[in-house]
Image (tube, grey):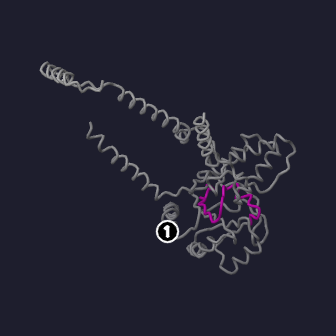
Amino acid sequence: MPRLKFFLPLAAFALLGILLFRGLSLDPTALPSALIGKSLPEFALADLHTGEPQSRESLVGAPMLVNVWATWCYSCRVEHPFLLELAERGIKIVGLNYKDDSAKALQWLADLGDPYAISLADTEGVFGLDLGVYGAPETYIVDAAGVVRFRHVGVLDPEVWQADFAPWFDSETAGEAL
Amino acid sequence: MRSTLFCCCRLLALAVLFVSLPAGAVIETYEFSEPSLERRYHVLSDELRCPKCQNQTIADSNAPIAKDLRFLLHQQLEDGASDEEILSFMVDRYGEFVRYRPDLDARTAVLWYGPAAVTVLAFLGLLLHLRSRRRPTAGPEPSAAELTALREQIKQLDGQGDSPR
């Protein structure tokens, strides 16, 4: 018994060590989206290019990404080349221009290239609010039935794609091939 | 008397340590049609958590999203929404995370009961520790030979006359 007491501090230290080490690889700011497994909310927004009204129905139909971006968002510029690459690979990306100046946004797309199949102008951030967006960039996976499957907050780069997005898209296309 | 005063001051200082005053970072002002709405606005904005700057309430935060949520809160209050309606609206979009006082369920039980459980455990531990200390440690009884030897020693010491009394 006294010998056991002697090792108690060491055991406590080891336990704390494990706990803190695990904490190193956790991201405390990562929030699960409240929308996972739920239907993409309805919206009535104007198309960024044409100004025509767009709705949920005009989007849904195939697996897609919904990318929230803005010209004031520096990280969006960082992830932009990768979005172009994804679009080239045939991934459908819907762009949600969030709380932005539409003229600046169009200029951005003209300068850097346009990876978006459809661009929505959410100048007031109303749809962003319904999505639970709290910053840009954010990227959502929405399946063919219009159900939100995944949300990534921050830059979408090849690493994140491989880890969190590719498995879902691969299984989805495999299902279509069968 | 002085020591009592000193003690009081120390207690007061300690109490102040554990009280944090909000920094008063409210940016915009809203007009309310009724004073009761304004009261509820302050209560709710102090209970809703900013999703971006995670350790601030939306009343404290300067982040654009917090501003949006305050705007929304004001709008919903003026539209006559109940507290429950407003909170569930926020939770539907930002998750249970957005509330500083989340509903009690399996995931938040640790949050609600954890501190009380730890306190109870700590007191139990303290109690056990104190009780084990008070109990006299009973060693082995001295043998008859030891007793006579001890008595002999005492007698000798008394005889020397150098006891303090």
Q: Position of residue A27 (x, y in %)?
A: 52, 58
Q: Residues within 10 Å of mark 1 (few under 14, many from 20)?
A: few
Q: Closer to the camera, A140 or B101? A: B101
Q: Count all numbered tags in the image, as a single digit.
A: 1
User: Furthest-left residue in view?
Assistant: B145
State which quadrant residue B3 falls in.
Answer: top right
Residue A67: say if magenta.
no
The N terminus of chain B lies in quadrant: top right
Q: Is residue B5 above or below residue B68?
A: above
Q: Chain of mark 1?
A: A
Name the side, left or right, on which A166 lies relative to A135.
left
In the picture as drawn, the residue positioned furthest to the bottom comes out as: A111
Residue A56 seen: no
* Pick the front one: B164 or B109: B164
Judged left or right of residue B122, residue B74 is right
Image position, residue A101 (x, y; %)? 76, 70
Give the residue number, with chain letter if any, for mark 1: A159
**Which quarter of the figure is the C terminus of chain B placed in?**
top left
Residue A65 screen position, x and y as percent: 61, 64
Q: Residue A122 lies in magenta, yes or no?
A: yes
Of B76 and B101, the residue lying toward us: B101
Q: B14 above or below A177?
A: above
Q: Residue A35 placed where, x, y %?
A: 62, 52
Q: Is residue A105 above or below residue B20?
A: below
Residue B153 in view, yes or no: yes
Q: Which residues are magenta?
A: A121-147
Q: Quadrant of residue B132?
A: top left
- Please report the residue visible at 73 percent of the width from the left and 60 percent of the height from the top: A125
- Residue type beneath disc 1: Glu
Residue at image coords 59%, 34%? B4
